[in-house]
Amino acid sequence: MKIATWNVNSLKARQDHLIRWLGAFDPDVVLLQELKGTEDKFPMMEVNAAGYQAQVVGQKTYNGVAILSKTPIEVTATRLPGEEEDEQARYVEGIVAGVSGRVRVGAIYLPNGNPAPGEKYDYKIRWMRRLYAHARNLLKTEEAFVLGGDYNVIPEPQDVYAPDQWTRDALFLPESRNALRHIVNLGLTDAFRAMNPEGGRYSWWDYRSGSWDRDEGCRIDHLLLSPQAADTLTASGIDKTPRGWDKPSDHTPVWCELNI
DNA sequence: ATGGTGGCGGTGCCA
């Protein structure tokens, strides 16, 4: 089972890229972020025609997440628990069936948090604490799950070009990295890092300053696996192809393969 | 050096 995550930076602007990439890469499950539209704007007919069912949590202009799957999706959550007044569309979770078992998948769009310090950074850290609590609860099920998405956190210096330029950024502040490590230390596996020990591999490149052409990016899109999912991990990678297409998203898909 | 680019929506906000 191939599971991928991709921040498309507007599905309206990236619909053709999504359909093209689904056909080329043939994933079983895709976790999408930054749809930047409400549910009624989702191109359900085109996604269905490509062979996928979809569960969408949308929002006007900002955020928006979705799960795409070749097999039916049993939705288990449409928001991250822990802050009832949080209206931002940043989480959707469901259970999908594989050949030999089932896996729970969560699509995550973690707050950017800039500028830091400030209200937006406080929201980011609160959101990460909520994710920690939710992951801890999910682990009690002792089932296979994948929490994947745009985490907006650079885990280590080897995951960013010129880390010294990012020391004041919300994506690389010690408190952000500590909060992510706290979540991983519950017993989760960063799929890409587990299968690719080398640094200098990125999932996002700024539109500005020729970052893509210079390969100056950072790795902020992650697939975190429960122990039961990690036990079935056979491969993981970053598909840089769509980032090189005309009018691309600034992110490119990160994927893992599970024997489920 | 405080920009640089892109999406949304039709102005500034967000990333």
Image (cartoon, coloured by chain):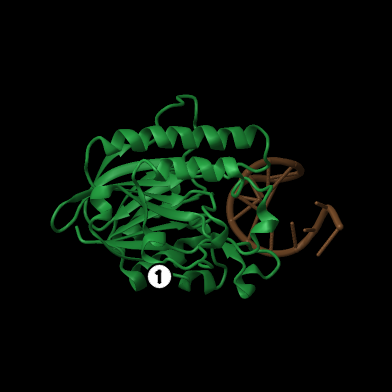
Quadrant (top left/top right/bottom left/bottom right) for the N terminus of chain A? bottom left
Viewer-side residue, A177 vs A61:
A177
Circle 1 marks a residue in which chain?
A
Quadrant (top left/top right/bottom left/bottom right) for the C terminus of chain A? bottom left
**Disc 1 marks which amino acid?**
Arg
Could you tell me how many numbered marks the image carries?
1
User: SS for tag 1?
Assistant: helix
Task: Please identify the quarter of the rendering in which residue A20 is found.
Answer: bottom left
Q: Residue at x 45, y 40 (%)?
A: A182
| Image spot of residue A74 (x, y percent) | 24, 43
Residue A191 versus residue A214 in the image, above or below:
above
| Image spot of residue A13 (x, y percent) | 53, 60
**What shade has chain B been given?**
brown
Q: Residue at x 45, y 49 (%)?
A: A41
Q: Which residue is mark 1?
A: A20
Visible residue check, residue A82: yes
Residue A89 versus residue A32 in the image, above or below:
above
| Image spot of residue A96 (x, y percent) | 23, 49
In the rendered image, the residue lying farthest to the top is A84
| Image spot of residue A132 (x, y percent) | 41, 36
Viewer-side residue, A125 vs A242:
A125
Q: Residue at x 44, y 32 (%)?
A: A130
* Mark 1 residue crowding within 10 angstroms, few (<14) / some (14–19) / many (20+): some
A149 relative to A102 in the view: left or right = right
Visible residue check, residue A250: no
Residue A148 versus residue A93 in the image, above or below:
below
**What shade has chain A been given?**
green
A33 relative to A24 in the view: left or right = right
Viewer-side residue, A221 vs A167:
A167
